[in-house]
Amino acid sequence: MQTSKQHRKWLDLSLLTGIFFIMILILVVTNANLIHTFDHIIAELVQNNRTASKTHFFVFITTLGNPLPNIGFTLILVDWLVYSKYYRLLSFAALSILLGTLGNSAIKLLIQRPRPLHKLISIGGYSFPSGHSTSSIILLSVLMIITANLVRHKWQRILIDLLAIIMILLIGLSRIYLNVHYPSDVLGGYLFGITIVLITDYLILPIKTEDENK
């Protein structure tokens, strides 16, 4: 459980990430030079010195963020939360995933940003925000928050958090490396996803009372 101070911090942070997401969205919609410069610099850094082994690695990583693995992970998580009767955490996880999925699809259809040319893998649909980045940060942030609530040993929480953060970053990098997304798509997906998780955490998860803090 969180203290009231921590609870308030999540709301403040969600407002901050939400504002940054809206700023990125506006830059994308207006086709601003700033977003083109950002995308060019980051994409050049990530895609520089491509090799066959790197490409195979990132193709594998990107498949971990595909819908089927995400559905499988979600079902396992939901089943375990139901079995363990953690209904508040279940509501938090389900609402975060639902809002993230529906929101990402709606924004894609609204913005209709074309994907980059010369993709290394075949893929359709629109580009902004990155669905892989959104889903990975939502699923793994949900996992980290559940871990923070249920795992007692600090070293176990740190290990889970570290692995989750590495996986989030790798999935985002894979989308840029394979040129199926612009870097701003990935950044937008991260900002949108974490905003959803933080707001849902604030609305659903309980806080410690004064007596529980003593």
Image: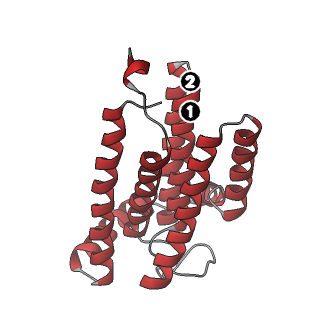
Q: Answer yes or no: do the residues labelled 2 and 1 have beta carbons within 8 Å?
A: yes
Q: Exactly how many numbered labels are in the figure? A: 2
Residue at the spot 50% in from the left edge and 70% down from the top edge: 103
Residue at the spot 64% in from the left edge and 58% down from the top edge: 56
Kindly indicate the quadrant of the structure image that contains residue 9: top left
Residue at the spot 76% in from the left edge and 45% down from the top edge: 79
The CA distance from mark 2 to mark 1 is 9 Å
Residue to which mark 2 is pinned: 156
Kindly indicate the quadrant of the structure image that contains residue 192: bottom left
Residue to which mark 1 is pinned: 147
The answer, for residue 77, to whether it is visible in the render is yes
Which of 116/102 is in front?
A: 102
Farthest-out residue, top: 214
Q: Earlier in the sequence, mark 2 or mark 1?
A: 1
Q: Amino acid at mark 2?
A: Gln
The answer, for residue 179, to whether it is visible in the render is no
Q: Is residue 114 above or below residue 52?
A: below
Q: Is residue 35 above or below residue 203?
A: below
Residue at the spot 60% in from the left edge and 81% down from the top edge: 124
How far across and how far down the image is residue 23, in percent?
26, 69
Task: For mark 2, give the secondary structure.
Answer: helix
Pick the quarter of the image with the C terminus: top left
